[in-house]
Amino acid sequence: MEPSLLSLEKLDRSSPDLWPEQIPGVYDFAPLLSPQLSPDPQNLDLEEQDINLLYQFRLLTALEIIEEVKKLQNVAYQLGLEEAKEMTRGKYLHILNNKKPK
């Protein structure tokens, strides 16, 4: 690998605050597993492949779902690294200049 194309950008993998503190009493009004809150996948205008994937996820245990989420996080992290490399390459090749030719 050419050293001039190496990205020195450090990506922070820490998670943002996705689950803020819950307000007391919010869940007293509606049950967590209400049929009205869980739409039927058939009504969501999904493709056959997406519906099959949803049904496969329904069969997973909690630990298997956690593993799937970890896989997605790793893929997203790798994609971020690749994007950083490409942005660095673009910078060195002057592809992303703001100057317009006259």
Image (cartoon, rainbow, N blue to C red):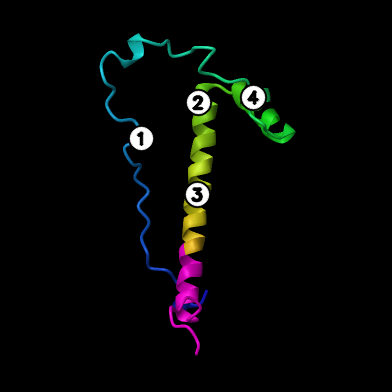
On whether residue 82 falls in the magenta region, the answer is: no
| Circle number at residue 18 | 1
What residue sits right under mark 2 in the picture? 63
Q: Earlier in the sequence, mark 2 or mark 4?
A: 4
Find out whether the residues at labels 3 and 2 contact each other: C-beta distance under 8 Å: no
Residue drawn at 29 percent across, 30 percent down? 20
* Helix, strand or loop at mark 3: helix
Give the residue at the far bottom of this rendering: 102
Up-down: is 20 above or below 36? below
Disc 2 from disc 1: Cα separation:
20 Å
Which of pointers 3 and 2 indicates the residue nearer the eye? 3
* Helix, strand or loop at mark 1: loop
**Residue type at the position of mark 1:** Leu
Give the residue at the far front of this rendering: 102
On whether residue 94 falls in the magenta region, the answer is: yes
Which of pointers 3 and 4 indicates the residue nearer the eye? 4
**Residue type at the position of mark 4:** Pro
What residue sits right under mark 3 in the picture? 76
* Helix, strand or loop at mark 4: helix
Where's residue 72, x and y in %? 52, 42
Where's residue 80, x and y in %? 47, 56
**Residue type at the position of mark 3:** Ala
* Helix, strand or loop at mark 2: helix
Q: Is 61 placed left or right of 22 in the picture?
A: right
Where's residue 19, x and y in %? 34, 30
**Magenta extent:** 84-102
Q: Which of marks 3 and 2 is nearer the N terminus?
A: 2
Disc 2 from disc 4: Cα separation:
23 Å
Find out whether the residues at labels 1 and 3 contact each other: C-beta distance under 8 Å: no
| Circle number at residue 41 | 4
Which of pointers 1 and 3 indicates the residue nearer the eye? 1
